[in-house]
Image (tube, rainbow, N blue to C red):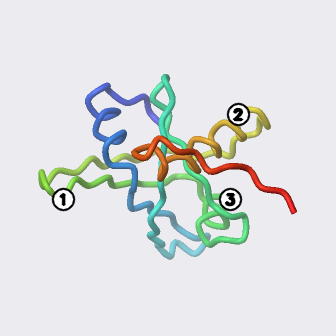
Amino acid sequence: MKKLTSEVFDFIAQNRAAAFATSSKQNIPHVATVFCVADDDLTIYFATRVESRKFRNLSAQPVVSMAFTNEKLMETVELTGTAKRVESLPEEQEILYRLVTLRHQERNQEPPPMQL
């Protein structure tokens, strides 16, 4: 995706959920909610299952649109760009860790790894 300004980065940091729009090979639109993190280079990351419609659509047509919303301020940020799969395993693990810990940030508590 195109580099973001720090103002947009701050907006996304405080409004992590986005409406995420893709299109199928047949140009049928699909919108789903994704939860995002951004890195220091202001690149946005999200995760989706390979079985999902989002992933199938991204594989066929990687151009996407996203809309982040702050309901209290009645403000939105809309972005359009090209999504691509993260290929580096260490980078993938870091992104997944950041996404998993999003819900635990306010409690300063990370989910412990479990083994059975």
* Residue at position x 39%, y 56% in the image: 17
The C terminus: image quadrant? bottom right
Please report the residue visible at 62 percent of the width from the left and 60 percent of the height from the top.
48
Q: Position of residue 97 (x, y in %)?
A: 64, 43
What residue is rendered at 68% in x and 59% in y?
A: 59
The residue at the far right in this view is 116
The answer to whether 59 appears left or right of 36 in the picture is right
**Residue closest to the eye, 96 or 41:** 96
Q: Nearer the viewer, mark 2 or mark 3?
A: 2
Residue identified by numbered label 3: 59
Q: Secondary structure at mark 1?
A: loop
> Residue beneath label 2, please?
91
In this picture, is 57 found above or below 14? below
Where does residue 58 sit, x and y in percent of width and height? 62, 59
Secondary structure of the residue carrying tag 2 is helix
Q: Is residue 88 left or right of residue 72?
A: right
- State how far apart marks 1 and 3 are (Cα): 32 Å
**Horizontal and vertical percent for residue 16?**
39, 49
Instruction: State the residue in front, 15 or 51.
Output: 15
At label 3, the amino acid type is Ser
Whichever of labels 2 and 3 marks the residue nearer the N terminus, that label is 3
Report the residue marked by disc 1.
71
The mark nearer the N terminus, 1 or 3, is 3
Asked whether disc 2 touches disc 3, contact meaning CB atoms under 8 Å apart, the reply is: no
Indicate the secondary structure of the residue bearing disc 3.
Answer: helix
* Residue 18 position by quadrant: bottom left
